[in-house]
Each structure stands twice: as C-alpha cells, then as structure tokens.
Amino acid sequence: MGTAVEKVKRELILEGLDCANCAMKIENGVKKLDGVMDCSVNFVSKTLTMEVDKTHDQDVVTAAKKKVNQLEPHIQVVEKGNGAAAKAAISHAAAQHGHNHDHGHTHDHDHAHDHSHGHSHDHGAGNTKRMIIHLIAGALLTGVGLLSPVTGVAEFVLFTIAYLIVGGDIVLRAVKNILRGQVFDEHFLMSLATIGAFAIQQYPEGVAVMLFYQVGELFQSIAVNRSRKSISSLMDIRPDYANLQMGNETKRVAPEEVRVGDLIIVKPGERVPLDGKVLEGRTAMDTSALTGESVPREVEPGDEVLSGFVNKNGVLTVEVTKSYGESTVSKILELVQNASSKKAPTEQFITKFARYYTPVVVIVATLLAIVPPLLISGATFSEWVYRALVFLVISCPCALVVSIPLGFFGGIGAASRQGVLVKGSNYLEALNDVKYVVFDKTGTLTKGAFTVTGIYPANGATREELLRSAAYAELHSNHPIAESIRAAYGQELQAADVQEYNEIAGHGIQVQFEGKQILAGNAKLMNREQIPFKTPEEPGTVVHVAIDGSYAGYIVIADEIKEDAEQTIRSLKELGMKKTIMLTGDAKAVGEAVGRKLGLDEVHAELLPQHKVEEIERLDRQKARRDKIAFIGDGMNDTPVLARADVGIAMGGLGSDAAIEAADIVIMTDEPSKLSSAIHIARRTRRIVWQNILFALGVKAVFLLLGAFGIASMWEAVFSDVGVTLLAVLNAMRVLRTKELA
C-alpha cells in the first residue's frame, strides 16, 4: 500500500449558517486547504465534516475555522466534541457574540430560529421581531415619502433613511464580501440594483424593492427553518442522559460516559440511551423511531434493547453491551448527518451550473447597460442601466441552490421515518434507476429461523406420536433442526426417559425411549437400516422416524418465508423492475421452491460468497448502461456482494454489523417490502427536485427576457427571485409528507 496518510474525521458546527449558497462557498473554500482530504458542509444539520491528515490535525482545524470566518464572518464555528459540551459551547458562543459588531445592523434576522436548536429560544424570536420592526419602520417612512409633497434634497434624505433602516445590513455585508474578494452573491446583486435605482432617482422603488426582498428573506428563513425542524424532529432520537446504577443509587450521566458492562436504569417514558440486554423488568417498547413499527414490542429479561427505543410502562435494569459511539442511535444519527455529504448528481450539476451561470449573467447585464445606448439613437443610459439592474436581480440562482439539497434531505428524512436509512442522496437518486433486484434468501426473504412446516405420519402412527418420538430422539442435539422439532413438540422433555443415546455421524440418532428403539435421521439412515420410507414432495430438511424398525413417517423442517416477501416481489414488478433474482447458499430444491412460491425470475442456489459476486458481475455485463442493480442481504457473507452492487441494501435489525457497514441503504425493520417504499420515496424526491429546477429556470428565463426588453420592473424582478425560492422551498417540504405507502 505504501505509506498511507492516516486520516481522522473532524466536525465543526456552523451556528448561523442560513443559506445554502454560503454552505457551498464554505465547502469549496475549506476543500482547498492543505491537509484536508475531503470536506462537506451539511446545510440542514449545520455541520462541516472533513477528513484531515492526522499529523497536522489541530492546525488544519484552526485553518478551517479561520477560513469559515473569513468567508462568512457572522458564522460561529464550534468544534463538535461530546454532544452536551458542544451544545453548551454553541449557546455560550451565541451569548458571547450576541453583541458582536460584526453582525452589522439588523442582519441578525438571518439567524431567525437558528439557536432554538441549542438552548435559547427567545434569541431567534427576538431577531425575527427586530427585523419585523425595521421593516415596518422602513415601510412607514416610505409611505410618508410618497404621500408628502417633499422634493429635492428632503425627499432624498427621507428615502435614504428608510433605505438604511430596511437594507443597511445587506449593503454592509455586500461591502465586506467584496473586500474579501467574494463579489457575486445575492447581497451584492441587491445592493447594486437598489443603489442603482437611487442613482437614477427612482427612490421609492429602491426602498420598496429592498423591503420586498427582506420580507421574502424573512419568509424564506422561516420556511427553511421549518423544514430543518421537521427533518431534525425525525432525527430527534438522541438520548440526553443515562441513569447509571452505582451501588444502591443512580446517577444521571451523559450517555458517552457509560462503559460496556455498566448497569443503567430506564424509567417509563424515557428513551433507552445505549444498546444493552435487559436484566430485570418487563415493559412494552415503542420502537417506531428506529423501525417505523407502530405496534409496541414487549421485552423481558434476556431480551436485547436498542438505543432510541422508548420505554412505555415498566422500569428496566439494562446491562450495557455497546459504548455510545457504537450504539444504534449514534450510528443512525451519524448516517443521517453524513447522508448529504455524498451528493446526488443533480446536486453536483446545480453547484457547477451556479459557478458558471452568475459570471455569465453579470457580463450580459454589463453589455445590456452599455451597448444599446451607444448603438440605438434616443436610448438613454438611465433606462438601460435600470434594465440591466433588473436583469441582475432576476438572475440570482438562490431557488436552485436552496431547494435542491433540501429536497434530497427531505427524501432521506421521509425514508428514515419508514425505517429505511439511506446513507447519501446519491444512493437515493440511484434507487430511481434500479432495474434488477437481487435477494439473498436466508434472513432476507425468509426469517432465517427453522420451523416444522409439516408432520406426515405413516403405518398407523399418529402425528402426536411421531412428533413426540422425534423430539425425544433429538433431546441432546443442539443443531437448529433438533431445536425446531423440540419447539414444535412444545412440552417438557424428561431426560431420564431416554437411554442409549447414540449419534450416528452424517446419518442421525438412535435412542431407547419407553422401551422402544427409535431412529431419527436422513434418508441415508433409513437405507442403512433397510427400512422402506416415503420420499417427500415438499422442499426442506426432512427427518425420517422409525420405531422398532417400522417406518413411522417424516417431519419437514424449513425456513419460513417472511410475511411480506410475496408482496415485495409483486410491488417491485409493478414498479417496473426487469428482473428479480435470488442468490442462496442453500440446496437447489429449497431455493427453487422459495423462488416458485414468490414468483422470482431467476434462482441461483448452492453459492459461496465469491460466487454471489460473480453472479452480480455477470448481470452487470448484460444490463443496459443506465440500469442499476440493487442487492439485499443480511449476513457477514453478503458483505462483498453489498459492496459490489450499484446499491447495496442491508437488513438492519438482524443483519451483521459488517453487512450494515458495507451497505448503502439499511432497512431497520427487516421487511423486504420497505424496499418498494424507498423506491417510491426516491421517485417522488426526484420528481419534486426536477419540478423545482424546471420551475425556477422557467420563471427566470421569462423574467430575464421581460427585463431585457424593459417590460418587467424591479418589483417583478424581486418577485421572480424571492418568490420562486420560497415556492421551491415549500415544494421541497412536500417530500417529507410521504405517508405510509402500500
């Protein structure tokens, strides 16, 4: 491998991050720093995640903080430590910087509800209130200016005061950004357009446009915060504390402080803070936060409980089996937090688009201001400068930049509400193109637990007698098949009743029971003892039983198919899948029987893990270029296939940790039918995202033409910018309202 650089992951919380455009600027800025291997800013959870060179870890973090403050001075950067510490640090930082002159004037409204996430709720509400007061004052002054007969200097002064009250902070920010070499942003466009209106003596319009823009910004910030809130409420499963048992008393501690093997108490109404095993107590658990399952799950001593479950009624003593960092909740939170760092192609397209689009528009606007007055006789500079300014305001790509990440994040949120965790918006996007679904059998389409599915007595023996004899014969075996026979018999077995227990390797068992000789085993055992037997029709593992040398019948043991497996295959067909395929290590007869029952297109049985990968590769060579292959599995042995498929999906409830790590999507409920729900959500998300793109570009194109020909005034220009963004954000919020899908 050579000398690989050791990477560590660092997270910074960006308090006050309120526009997707700033998030994009920060991400691009920090990416370019030395020692940063990878960086992504998650606009919704306000975190910057970066992979840095371990040797210069602290230097790089300091450089990143500096870079963020240089790009966006109003953002407070807090290094993400332990949850509680970080929260305290945020609220502390908020208090410290509350009066920081850097905030300019009224600009604080941008933080509208930002800090409510930490501690202080009023802080955000106060800013919104202050902004509203500024807007009302500005509007009143503008009204006075329009209605009173003032002219000349008095009129100019009156409108200038109104303008500064309403938009002083925007101008201030634009100036600061220009000083830092960040020219083309929305503050610059707005300032340029409104000051331009003053220059051509359109005072009322200059103020009114800024007023309208600020009102739009206010609504937009409220809408973005609402969708942020509804997304984070989906994710609000982080436990705040654990009751640690110390001797005879309990102490409330942060979940991070609890060690494996410690005992914690979970009272009614509390959230389980860490994964563990119940030692004492019985209760019903609300598991809906993790599994989307509405029916409470009963737990008793010996059962596993996962962090994020809510205890409904009893008091539990739980022995902790995983530290907080390894617990289910923290894994899920991490997945969702990082989900948006893997950007979907649509998002990347918009980022690139914005990068070239703004400079082009600025050049066109400059030409629009200068060329016509020089070439067309009778054209005045003031008119064409005004048109150019209108053109500039319309061109701002805010709607696209804000609504698209929100759309994808909403999709990921909606999926997690259904119990499906998508590890990145690129995987959500990829689900749209899945045309081949490949299933593992055991644990995915079947329950992975053996049960007796048929009891067939022969030669006058009764069902009861057959099952009883088999159960006693299998008394000492710990094979899953023996366990399932004992479970089916379901009565207490007396070990003293069995004599001369003799296991015949590869054949079965011979015992003396109630004075009779019993043989229980496979066909080879019957042949060896020369006992004629029936060959069963149905697939599964067969145990033949003979009593005193006479054939008594056979018992069939099979892995049960999951309740929703058949419906899963049906709904995938309805969604337009080209092929559903099952790969299994099980016997051919068993595999084919399951395939027939479920209506699968292809079944490949008796495969080892490497053969499964070969099958996926064979399929890959046959499929069309755009089509994608999804693989669903649950075991350790599925890890290579999960990594190889275009979209790897793991069963999260029973699945092995390795499979969950390797997968791109995790189904928490172990129900294969959730896959069709996830595809529904993915399609809906894509539809809404493209609606936004086409709507925003369409409206912009119309208004740009109207602006260039002088038909649209500054009012329409601002509407097309702010209005479209607002509508796009509201449309993106629809993704969250995905109801339970059949």
Image (cartoon, rainbow, N blue to C red):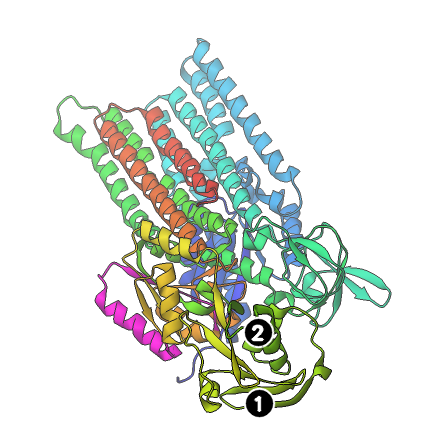
The kind of residue on which mark 1 rests is Glu
Q: Secondary structure at mark 1?
A: strand
Q: Secondary structure at mark 2?
A: helix
x and y percentages locating residue 396 in the rendered image:
34, 39
Label tally: 2
User: Is disc 1 surrounded by few (<14), some (14 to 19) or many (20+) residues within 10 Å?
Assistant: some
Q: Vertical placement of 648 versus 162: above or below? A: below
Q: Judge whether residue 34 can be spotted in this image.
A: no
Q: Nearer the viewer, residue 332 or 418?
A: 418
Most extreme residue toward the front is 460
The kind of residue on which mark 2 rests is Leu
Identify the residue shown where x is 37% and y is 77%: 606
Q: Vertical placement of 578 versus 163: above or below? A: below
x and y percentages locating residue 695 in the rendered image:
31, 36
Q: Could you tell me which quadrant the N terminus lies in?
A: bottom left
**Viewer-nearest of labels 2 and 1?**
2
The stretch in magenta equals 606-635
Q: Nearer the viewer, residue 277 or 411?
A: 277
Identify the residue shown where x is 42% and y is 50%: 677
Q: Vertical placement of 75 versus 66: above or below? A: above
Q: Judge whether residue 633 can be spotted in this image.
A: yes
Most extreme residue toward the right is 248
Q: Nearer the viewer, residue 656 or 485?
A: 485
Is residue 607 on the magenta stretch?
yes
Q: Earlier in the sequence, mark 2 or mark 1?
A: 2
Q: Which residue carries the number 1 mark?
A: 503
Q: Which residue carries the number 2 mark?
A: 466
- Discs 2, 1 touching: Cβ within 8 Å: no
Tell me how far mark 2 sits from mark 1, CA to CA.
19 Å
